[in-house]
Image (cartoon, helix red, strand yellow):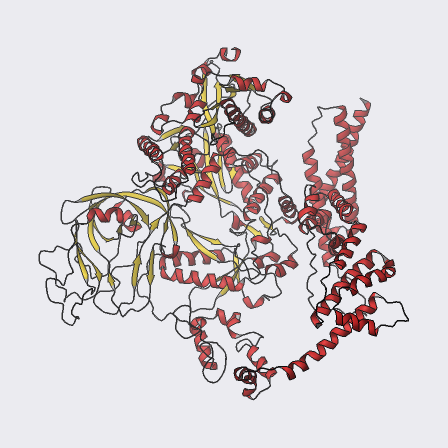
Amino acid sequence: MEKLQELVSRRRHTKGNITRLYNFVSSDKDVANSTTEALLVKKNRALESFSSYEKCNVDILQLDEKDDEDVSVVEERYFHILATLDAECNKRNSQEPKPSAPSAPISKLKLPPINVPIFSGKFTEYIPFINLFNSVINDNESIDYVQKLYYLRAYLRDEPLQLIKNLPLTHESYKKALGLLDDRYNNRFRIINEHISTLLDLNPLTKATAAGLREFSSNVRQEIAALTNLDPNIKYWDAIILCILCRKLDLLTSRAYQMERDTAMDPTVEDLLKFIDKQALALENVGPACGQSQSPRHTSQQQHKEQRPASTGKPVAYTAAQEASCLLCKSNHKLYLCKSFQLMPATKRVQFAEEKGICNICLGTHSGKCRFYFRCAECKQKHHTLLHCDNDKVEGPQAAASPASLAANKKMTTNSVLLPTAQVKLLARDGTEMSFKAILDSGSQLSFISERAVQLLDLKPLQSNINIVGIVNTQASVKRCVPVDIHSLVNPFKLSTTCHVVERITCELPQRKFDISDFVIPPYVRLADKDFNIPSQIDLLMGADCFFQAMLPPESTIYESAAPPSGAQPSAPGARHPQLINTQFGYVIGGSLPTQVCKKVAVFKCTCESDINENLTNFWKSESVPEIYNEKSSEQELCEYVFQKTVQLKDDFFEVALPLKLPFEDVNDALGDSFHFALKRFLNLEKKLHKDPNLFIEYQKFIHDYINLNHGHFVDIESYQLSKDAVYFLPHHAVLKPDSKTTKLRTVFDASMKTNKKVSLNDLLLNGPTVQRDLFDIMLLFRFGNYTFTTDIKQMFRNIRVIPEHTSLQNILWRDSPDETIKCIRLDRVSYGLKSSSYLATRCLKELAMHNERELPLASFILNNCTYVDDVLFSNSDLDLIVEAKSQLQQLLKKGSFKLHKWSANDSRILEDIPSTERHFDELEFQNDNCSIKTLGLQLIVHQDKFTIVSPESCDADNITKREILAYIGKFYDPMGFVGPIVVQAKSIMQKLWSSKSDWDSTPDDNIKSEWTEFLSSLAKMDPIYINRNVQFSDSDTLELIGFSDASSSTAYGCCVYLRVTDNEGKVHMHLLCSKSRINPLQNKNLTVPRLELNAALLLSVLIAKVTNTLKLKLKISRIYLFTDSQIVLAWLRTEVMKLTAYVANRVKAITNNTADCQWLYVNTKENPADYISRGVSPHELSGCDMWWHGPRFMHDTSKKWFVS
């Protein structure tokens, strides 16, 4: 007991030392007034104190296991002390000028970096590798052991890497790694043998040539030098080595050596090598002379080519120098490679070429006809692409930048084409009739309606998720659709279809007004569009789904019943004329027009293909059980190390370094040139933007806002030395988000663009670990508490600064007009598109929470446990507490200059002090009882406080293909497993579809087709499913977790988890929390029903461990009961592992580890709710399955007879 008191007293003393040092480093004034030597002394004092503190803790725990010392606080203070002292010492060392000998000249040359070669396990390469590594890395005192170990791993491949890869990234591991490598590869006997083997395996010389002799001599010297380093006594080996080498020489060289060597002296290897070098030199000197005199053939054409340079009357060297000099910047490069010339507007480039008399084809200066035959990549005319100008200015608004609509702005002197249009009637939401102009397009699989028409009709679009694929594989995403009835103006005909909403369908049609006075239209014809010759806005596109319903028997050309119009050529067989096409909307006119000049041709063709890969990835991700622990890779550990060492909070802004895999000074050599690739991408973007003025205005607004908010600034491109500086230019493009309430357009930066060295910026960045809780955890925690609020962190990435040294890696190109010079914008904030950005942003939030945990505990808890990227979801049953949490969260985020917006809450009192501009709903929207928001993918009806799940958009039952089925299944999103019995049916169909090995666009066999049709029919009958968000309970209630598992031999195995709440009155309430399922493997005879039941129990054990680990943050669970309807599984769980087969034993051990605090029980199959998820339930029946939503009836028995049985 006395020893324990002594240890506690000693620990208190060392803890006091650490606290005093912590207070010292927390005072900037004290640190600044201390000398560097004093800081180093304090650092050593901190190291000693913490070492003593840890030793005391270990000794105390051996005597008293219940010791509750909070070690984490002391550790945090200790790390803060070391980080502060290291940063201050490094800062002072970098500012102190280093003395140098006055006689030593200082080189101003930038020498190339010393690159350590990769070592892959070849014994002969080990000693050169380790010597160079020691010189460059190991002996560099500015690099600590952790970084040295990371670099060592980076320089190893194959077996050497496997030898040390499992060592943790610590100081001690570095020396251990060097020792392991030295023990394995510093094998002197093996290395000498391999060098001798190399000499024995040298290729024999068959003919004496200068190149062959030089190569032979070089290879021998290399091996001899290596052997000399290993054994200084190698000179005594000359007789043996000479015997080997002489056998490798050709006959003439060997004879000449024997005739020349001094027979009175013992021969040496060095004498032989000198002789070989002398022979090679002689052959080199003789070669050119012989070549001139003995060359038997020179054609007149070759002679002409050789004499051509002399015809200019100038020395060759002078001509070359003139050609290499840029006429604009006078640098040593061609004009077409000049960065300044490329950035000039096209008109100024043309003007410069004319003033300087530059050839329009090769951009050089010469007399006579140019010998090159370049053509412009834009217009195919005979001039250089850099001199191309768009002379055909487009008047009026352009077509929307939809990939489904392509417009070519080129003059046409052949027949132009008239697309068929019709005036149709649509009904507004209030029943008002409105007329719109529509285009009929049999080449489109879908029908489309413009955003303008939707707003005029006051229609409420539904959620959709398809990709529109057009000509040359251009793609656009469409997120909304709306059902419409299209009425004819000439008869009672009506057709119903679903139109997908786009900003604009195409340009005005026709592109220009044309004369129809010569058109002879029969008097009985009633046109669907009387103004078919006048440009008008298109608000509706009727695709193939409508086109063929509206078609009537065809008519002939409009010239058939009368003579051709005056001035038109007589119709030849096969001549093209407009056609009269009879439809339910009246006659439409389409086809070729008589010859006349037309400046624009509109082509519209699209096909629909859901982004199956992305949808299915999200589907399987939501179906998986999130991992509780993730093993961090060494790259992630180093990324975390770099962050902790470089992060700073300056003026309430976080400042971070980009986590690079290599030192910043080596980035330029590794990265290469990105400018020309980014420039090409920008010019393509510029063309796209100027085809859509609305898109250009939004994009320009984003760029200007970026500058005005000081998130970036203009820099002179000439200030960069692209061949020396670490510089990267980011391409950028627009991503449209029409569903977003705040940001319709988002600009994305592409840091994955490869440079001329096939390396991107993302390739050089470290990938940090995940620092936030996963979506499953956050959604689970969100279900507990009467009151909720949700909010978003506004521009989270852009509120974090990048250290100035690294901003040169974040440049974009921009100009407001093609007539301006292209400018460079340097981005000063963390940018989306970089591999490390998400980590840096979320890690800053974690840092903010960690440093303010005591002052603002509620806000810190929210950032650590209730935040997913920039979305915040928090709930609690105490109104005062949740209001306080909201206030703390605002205060905490303000410390890092983060702002919150899109606030929403289920009680208006929570948001009383939040301005309406920062709320998700305005006052009018909030009064609607059905107003809803998306919370991490699930729809939440705010006032009812319920999650709602509806079936995905209806699928075309007549077009059943593998592609369509998989695309539709990929739209299911149910991360918590609320409708798991429905999803398991879809997964079963997917499995059967894959096993059938049918083609993507072929119809599956009748069984699958019938099952899919029945599934769709049931989905159509399914009413919306509502799940209470709030799982209600009081502090005095007893909380228990109940889990069920089951397997079906025909379909799947799965599990579900419930919270059992027993209130003070003895009433029991069961709440479904989550479920997971797995489809049975195909054709596996070893998987019997008991083994499937065991797999179901294993899945339940993993899920219950995950749920328990998450809920302990909010709930106090008293007991956990797990049920299976397999007596065999229960018997296995009670059997010693050593007595079981390997397959069963492995799973039983995992189940036992996961459920050590749980009680396994038996349940009758008829009372097992997991039976629903193992067999599946028809979608329209699930809402009525009371046992699925509230558990079996016996669970409501408070006497717990089920536990006794």
Q: Is residue 533 above or below residue 275?
A: above
Q: Is residue 580 above or below residue 329?
A: above
- Measured as percent of width and height from the top left, residue 614 is found at 44, 44
Q: Is residue 372 above or below residue 453?
A: below
- Is residue 518 visible to the viewer in this orientation of the structure? yes
Q: Nearer the viewer, residue 1011 or 979?
A: 1011
- Measured as percent of width and height from the top left, residue 1065 is found at 46, 13
Residue 1189: image quadrant is: top left
Q: Nearer the viewer, residue 704 or 361?
A: 361
For this orientation, the residue located farthest to the left is: 523
Quadrant where the N terminus sits is top right
Q: Is residue 1027 left or right of residue 572?
A: right
- Is residue 108 visible to the viewer in this orientation of the structure? no
- Measured as percent of width and height from the top left, residue 134 is found at 76, 54
- Measured as percent of width and height from the top left, residue 748 is found at 47, 53
Q: Is residue 457 left or right of residue 109?
A: left
Q: Is residue 212 above or below residue 939?
A: below
Residue 949: image quadrant is: top left
Q: Is residue 1083 left or right of residue 267?
A: left
The count of marks equals 0
Residue 169: image quadrant is: top right
For this orientation, the residue located farthest to the right is: 264
Q: Is residue 483 left or right of residue 46?
A: left
For this orientation, the residue located farthest to the bottom is: 313
Identified at 71% across, 25% down, the residue is 67
Identified at 44% across, 44% down, the residue is 613
